[in-house]
Structure formats: C-alpha cells, structure tokens
Image: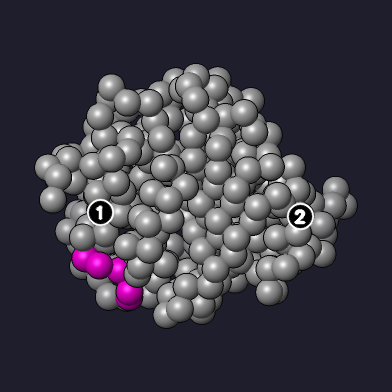
Amino acid sequence: MDAAVFREPKRRFIAIDSPAGGGEMAALDFGPASRAVDVVFVHANGFNAQTYRALLAPLSAGLRVLAVDQRGHGDSRLAADPDGRRSWLDLRDDLLALLQALDQAPVVLAGHSMGATVSLLAAAQAPGKVSSLVLLDPVIMPRMVALYAKAPWTSGRLWKRMPIAQAASRRREVFDSREAAFAAYRGRGAFKTWPETMLADYVGGGFKDRPDGKVELACTPAWEASNYAAQGHDPWRAVSQFRGPVRILAAETGSTCRIGDGAAFARRGKAVRIETVAGTSHFLPMERPDLVREAILDAAT
C-alpha cells in the first residue's frame, strides 16, 4: 500500500470572511500540498474533522482532502452563539467563505449528517465552486416539515423541545481526561458500532484542555442542541438549484434522510442518485468506510 496512506494530515487554520462572523476555520489537510484540493469533507453535528481521519487518510494516496471543523466544533476559531439560531445558513455561509478562500478549481463536497446537508446548501449557492456532492445520511426532513420549520411564525422554542435537542443540552461537558471520556463512550449509546480508532479520534479532536487539568467538549452542549433545533433551511429547494451530480448514501435503520422512496427528491435535481446501505445506521461512515471511500473516490476522479 502507498506510504501516503499512513501520512498524518497537516493541521491548518484558514481565514474566512463569513457573514456569520469572520475568523479562522480549522482543517485537517490530507494529501500532497502541491495538489489542489479535490474534496472538502464536512462533519456531523457535535463531531469534528479528526473523527474521520481513518476514513479519509487512505484517500490521500491519490487525492487531496480537506476536512474542516465547522463553527463551534473542534479547533475552529469562529464565535458560536446558540441564541436565536433558526437554520444552518450560518454554517452554509462559513463553507461558502471557505470555498472563496481556497480560490481554486471546483471541489467535491462530501459530508455526514448535518455536514452533508450544509454541503448541499452551499453547493446550491456556489455551483461554479462545487463539481459534485457525496452526502452520507444527510438530515433531510419531509418537504412539509421543512416548509413548516422555516416559516417566520414558527417558534424556535418548539424545535428546542425535540428530544434529541434536549438530550444534547444535558450532555456531560467535562471529564477528568480524554482517556476518561473515551472509557465513558466506548461501546455505549451512539458509539456502539464505532471502531475504537474512530472513537479515539473523535475524543482527540473533540475536547479542549482546561486550566484545572480536566477537559471539556469543544462543541458545547448548547451549540450542539442549537444545531438540532435550527431547522429553518430548505434542502429540497437546494437540490433543485444545484445542477451537478448528487450521490446520497442513506442508512438502513435510524436514518435522518426522511425523503420516502426518494423519487420526489431526486426529480428536483439534475443527477441525483440515492442508495440505502444495507446493515447500516446513521453512523454509516464508521460502519462502512470502504463504501464511503469508494463513493468519494468515484466522485473525485
């Protein structure tokens, strides 16, 4: 196997001028710096770029992949105020600002869960900067729910009462060490199907050191909860605006891609391909990294 598979990614901080607030977006850069970026990868809510290191590193044998930490996550230096948020358009604007900062040929946007949806929203606004999309169990509500969520008279308090948002807001934020956090998560809850390497990377990139020697979540429970509650964006409209190829890999159980058989959603786009991956949950990048790598490689070559 090519030695590039084992090459550690480089940590970068990229200045962005986003309408949501400027600053530096952190990223892991996989592959040769002499090559233009082929793929920008966007993580799920509450996760971080490092979580996907084992998934993305093998691609650096032939591609350059930039995995970003979104606002309020990982090492990014972007203010994250959860109050009053109604949608993911702030995260979309951050991604658009990143593409502007890269100032290069169009890239493949790939993402997981929230990151997949943010990628779709961004691609709809920047067709000249995005060649295609690979969306891993994106968060897409039924059309009528999406329209209701974005209505100006819909109270944001309603979405904050969702069980998943409430659970996120109560999440334990401080641990004695990263090792203690790893032990607490290992084999439990959402992490049951995760390989230990990916869990270790999630913990490695998802905590910050405190002055008292303990560690705390880089993505605060309040910010994570606000992402679950802020559903006033419209991926159905976005897919009709983007004219490039879209490949969706949906989970078989517990999927957040709630588009029925997908036919109505696919008709809105130009070249939308939707596949349900047998035996997977919402964490399909952790469960089927081989298939995900194949999809990204196919889109980028």
Residue placed most toward the observer, 223 or 272: 272
Magenta stretch: includes residue 162: no
Q: Whole-percent x and y of residue 294?
A: 37, 57
Q: Which residue is mark 1?
A: 54
Q: Is residue 121 visible?
A: yes
As drawn, the label of residue 268 is 2
Residue 76 in view: no
Nearer to us in this view, 272 or 168:
272
Contact (CB < 8 A) between labels 2 and 1? no
Secondary element type, mark 2: helix
Instruction: Establish if 15 lies above or below 131.
Output: above
Question: How far from the left and from the top, in percent, is residue 152?
Answer: 85, 48
- Residue drawn at the location 25% of the way across and 54% of the way down: 54
202 on left or right of 43: left
Percent from the top left, x then y, of residue 32?
25, 29
Q: Residue at x 18, y 46 (%)?
A: 5
Q: Residues within 10 Å of mark 2 (few under 14, many from 20)?
A: some
Magenta stretch, residue numbers: 191-196
Let me know if residue 192 is in the magenta part: yes
Relative placement, left or right, of 3 versus 268 is left
The image shows residue 127, relative to residue 268, as above or below, that is: above
Quarter holding residue 96:
top right
